[in-house]
């Protein structure tokens, strides 16, 4: 079972990963976007960890709802609403349960990814965060406890955006010039899924 501490540890690990990878995310975004993805997510996840320390949510769903609100409030551009929607939708799906199964988390993340697709109007293959998130939730649907497999699928999905032509977001304005660059949103999404696998590996440690 996955308890509140697991979800807090997951998001704390997300914040650490984003902090380390912020320069790379910004570099990727400089090629096909606004060059602010790393800085934006760094600010957003720092706000998430501060809010979790301050408010101490009492359930996995409440952790994700709080994190989603913080990302919407602090991350600029499209990333804040999209990441916020991902976590808020997943949090709502988990409800008030004090613990959830990996299968319930997998189903909740599917709800989140579906909500992101609805908000952004994107599909896999459009060179967006969905190209990492969709294969991750597919992997989890087949084996909900296999967070490591989901992380690998997300990383492969992010890498697969390199030859794609962007069809959504600011990168789509570049047309064929968007090809040859890894999508920064897919890359940061893969970091989030990798942190999920790391949270599982560090079970029992402090959030």
Image: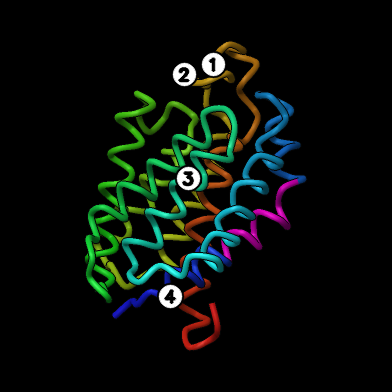
Instruction: Look at discs 1 and 3 and give the one toward the viewer.
Output: 1
CA separation in Å, label 4 and label 1: 37 Å
Per the rendering, the mark at residue 167 is: 2
Label whose residue precedes the other's in the sequence (1 or 3): 3
Left or right? Give the position of 137 relative to 31.
Answer: left
152 up-or-down from 147: above or below: above
* In the image, residue 111 lies in the stretch drawn in magenta: no
Principal secondary structure, stretch drawn in magenta:
helix
Position above or below: 28 against 53:
above
* Residue 3 percent across, percent down from the top left: 35, 77
Disc on the earlier residue, 2 or 1: 2
Estimate the spatial distance between the alpha carbons at disc 2 and disc 3, rounded to whole Å: 16 Å
Q: Are marks 4 and 3 in contact (CB under 8 Å)?
A: no
**Looking at the image, is mark 2 or mark 3 earlier in the sequence?**
3
Q: CA distance from mark 2 to mark 1?
A: 5 Å
Measuring from the top left, give residue 203's x and y in whole percent: 47, 84
Q: Earlier in the sequence, mark 4 or mark 2?
A: 4
Q: Disc 1 marks which residue?
A: 172
């Amino acid at each position: 079972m996955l308890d509140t501490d697991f979800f807090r540890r997951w998001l704390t690990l997300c914040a650490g990963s984003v902090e380390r990878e912020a320069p790379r995310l910004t570099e990727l975004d400089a090629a096909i976007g606004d060059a602010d993805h790393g800085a934006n997510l760094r600010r957003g996840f720092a706000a998430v960890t501060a809010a979790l320390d301050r408010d101490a949510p009492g359930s996995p769903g409440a952790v994700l709802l709080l994190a989603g609100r913080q990302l919407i409030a602090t991350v600029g551009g499209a990333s804040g609403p999209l990441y916020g929607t991902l976590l808020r939708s997943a949090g709502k799906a988990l409800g008030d349960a004090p613990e959830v199964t990996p299968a319930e988390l997998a189903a909740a993340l599917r709800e989140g990814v579906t909500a992101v697709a609805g908000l952004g109007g994107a599909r896999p293959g459009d060179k967006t965060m969905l190209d990492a998130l969709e294969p991750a939730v597919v992997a989890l649907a087949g084996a909900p406890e296999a967070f490591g497999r989901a992380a690998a699928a997300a990383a492969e999905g992010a890498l697969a955006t390199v030859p794609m032509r962007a069809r959504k977001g600011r990168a789509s304005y570049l047309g064929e010039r968007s090809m040859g660059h890894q999508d920064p949103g897919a890359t940061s999404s893969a970091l989030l899924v990798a942190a999920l696998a790391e949270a599982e590996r560090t079970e029992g440690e402090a959030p």
